[in-house]
Image (spheres, rainbow, N blue to C red):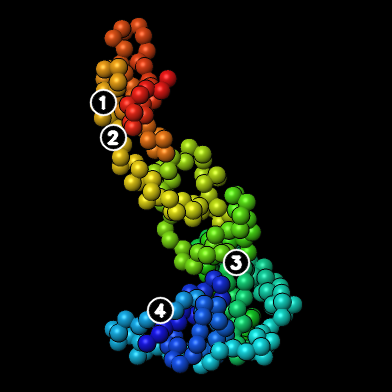
Amino acid sequence: MLIAQVQFAPWDKAYDFLVGALSLTIGTAVIVKTELGTELGHVLALSEAKNNGNERELKPITRIANDKDCARLPSEARKQEVLTFCREMIAKHNLPMKLVDIHFSFDGGRFNFAFISGGRVDFRELVKDLITHFNVNIRLTQIGTRDEAKLSGDCGGCGRDLCCRGFIKDFSSITSEMAEAQQVVHRGSERISGMCGRLLCCLSYEYEGYKEMAGKLPPLGTKIKVNNGASGTVIGHHILKQSVDVRIKSDKPDERDLVIEVDLSRRQPKR
């Protein structure tokens, strides 16, 4: 039994539906019936059911959307008109929220506004005004800054399109440990953060590789000998070069300790 993950808005989560006898591919526009009404969404992924009984609770996809269905969707002008009014109401109630996008249900009976905010927002009065003005059901969904960048971002510092606007479907946790493992923390938070203000998603791409390479180097504080017979202490790593910085203590109290870079593959010090 095949299950499709269907998404209705780029900032919303995906929902599972039974495929049935339909022939679907990634990106296919489909019509589904939900508990809140009829929706038009796009297939994000297809997978086989795990036969754990949960598939019995899933609703089937009604049909594949056609050109007439897509033509029924509100125009960009209509979208901006609704967003403009909502922003005016947000300003009226002096709410600490930034409106990002809107999703119209396919049956036209529900508007779902996406916004970002630094905390919780009491938007009850805002909802009343929107219901009175548009005469539809209103939902407000708080999203994260990464979702906003995925929706409205452009190019990253690398000069390429943002990864979240291309192939990233689910945001994974990016930690400072990843930046430390790749020895880029010294660049400063601004250089290792994306447009969303969070740590770059690409820090996760090579993290496992860096961890594996770092595991081949002796831990800091390890005593090692270099080819000239001198003994020293490892005080720094160069993961990509697979070399370490070694401090060799001076025998004379009036001289500084010597620090050399040692290529572990050759154990030859680099001055």
Q: Is residue 152 above or below residue 134?
A: above
Which sits earlier in the primary sequence, circle 4 or circle 1?
4
Which of the 4 image quarters holds residue 90?
Answer: bottom right
Real-space Cα separation, disc 1 to disc 3, in angstroms: 52 Å
Q: Residue at x 64, y 59 (%)?
A: 154
Picture coordinates of residue 207, whole percent (x, y):
40, 50
Q: Nearer the viewer, residue 112 or 85?
A: 112
Q: Secondary structure at mark 2?
A: loop
Q: Quadrant location of residue 92?
A: bottom right
Q: Which mark is residue 151?
A: 3
Distance between mark 4 and mark 1 Cα atoms: 52 Å
Q: Position of residue 224 (x, y in %)?
A: 26, 26
Of marks 3 and 4, which one's residue comes earlier in the chain? 4
Q: Secondary structure at mark 3?
A: helix
Tag 1 residue:
224
Give the label on residue 47, or none.
Answer: 4
- Looking at the rendered structure, the kind of residue marked 3 is Leu
